[in-house]
Amino acid sequence: MEAVRRAVLPPSTASATLRGRPPGWGMRRAAGLGLALALAAGLALAAGLALLPGAAGAAVPHLAPRVYAGGGVLGFGDAAAVNAPQGAPLSSVMVALAPNPAADADHQGYWLAGADGGVFAEGNAGFYGSTGALHLTGPVVGMAATPDGRGYWLAALDGGIFAFGDAGFHGSMGGTPLNQPIVGMAATPDGGGYWLVASDGGIFAFGDAAFHGSTGGLVLNEPVTGMAATDGGGGYALVASDGGVFTFGDAPFEGSLAGGLGGDAANVPPVAGIAFTPDGRGYWLLEPDGWSYGFTNPPSPDPSPTGSAVVAIAAAQVNADPTPGDFCNPYGPCEEWCALFATWVWQQAGVPIPSYAFTGDIDQWAQANTGVLPAAGPIVPGDAVLYGTGPWSTATSLHVGLVVQTWPDGAVVTVEGDAGPAPVGSLAVIVNGPYLPADSETYNGMPVYAVAEP
């Protein structure tokens, strides 16, 4: 099972945030968790695609998670605590989780991958190499393992493929212009090929992976965030950020989560990946905000003291909002607080900006004092990414995030206050990305209109 990208505002709150949410209010991209929830609830994928190792349909929908020490991996059902605590802050955000297909129920294991291609082998999963020591052009976004568990592939945002162990290289989209970035991958049952999927649902098949169709020519309500193949490799399913499921080949459609889930939205974690246990009676969810990050790989192109201080201060704040009350927060009064958070961080880093509650005021202050760049940048760590269409009003200037990592291809990672998933009014400080600012309207639900310099 391949890793699903960023996660999510629960469907029960998505309509209030992505469509007509309070202007200037923070959010995280609504993505990724739809596939995990569909499987967990015994809907489309768990019921019909035989994606669970072992017996198909052995999903466990209502089990309490076990939160493991040392990282953001949550186990459900018989998922064992196999990950070792991580010591020093990681150099890039965790983006992918892949199970060891050769594991048994008593000796479980999986791999974790960071955006820089660093690989962490947990439990009985073996380490076969990584790109963690390299300076990649673009971030890694997905991972899949070979059938015998003796190798794995990493997939990058630009469609580049890195093969390790007994994983064969069967081709890639690296160097080929894409309409939309790659968001995930899945491997064929014999390891002789793999598929890549882009956020528009475009499918790229390599090796013995057969093309069974795509949504690349359709207009989607929400972007595709991940894919999974059937046991025999004769089909695959795509999942969109609203939980919509699209099936191709011999993958049957059994329903989807598009249109709402209900339940306790406060208990929905920010999920970037899912991996099932060998017997299919449990699964792990990857919560990227569960680690500490130094954001050191790739190295900053502008290691200025101010930028470095902004990164360190913002990263240290990633956590659930500890202040009770509707929109109450540690950075200002009880109101929408993404701008309050951003200006507070800049102030702590020595930037003489007032405390602003409106994101457009950050743009105006930077216009008069430090500088404002177009969305194309060049963006460096410490900058503030301003979302919306312009600084004129709360209807046009919607949200702000602080850049903590940049990539040569222009991708960024941000830390954002008043963001989710969580109930409206009880949001958090989260890590968002990696994503290309040019694709922000697809990835975040709103474009980037400017970049303010500190």
Image (spheres, helix red, strand yellow):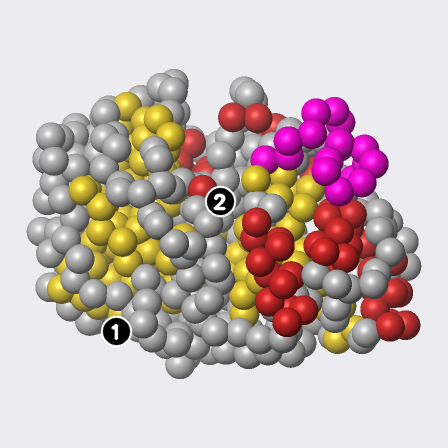
Residue ID at (35%, 19%): 63
Give the left or right position of residue 225, taking residue 310 as reference.
Answer: left
Query: Reading the chain from its start, which is encountered first: label 2 or label 1?
Result: 1
- With respect to residue 269, does 120 lie above or below? below
Amino acid beneath label 2: Asp
Any magenta on residue 307?
A: no
- With respect to residue 10, does 432 lie above or below? below
Residue 437 at least partly seen: no
Q: Secondary structure at mark 1?
A: loop
Numbered circle sitting on residue 289: 2
Residue ID at (16%, 48%): 125
Residue 61 x/y as whole percent: 36, 21
- Give the residue at mark 1: 171
Residue ID at (39%, 76%): 135
Magenta: predominant secondary structure element? loop
- With respect to residue 328, does 450 lie above or below? below
Crowding at mark 2 (Cα within 10 Å: few <14, some 14-19, many 20+): many
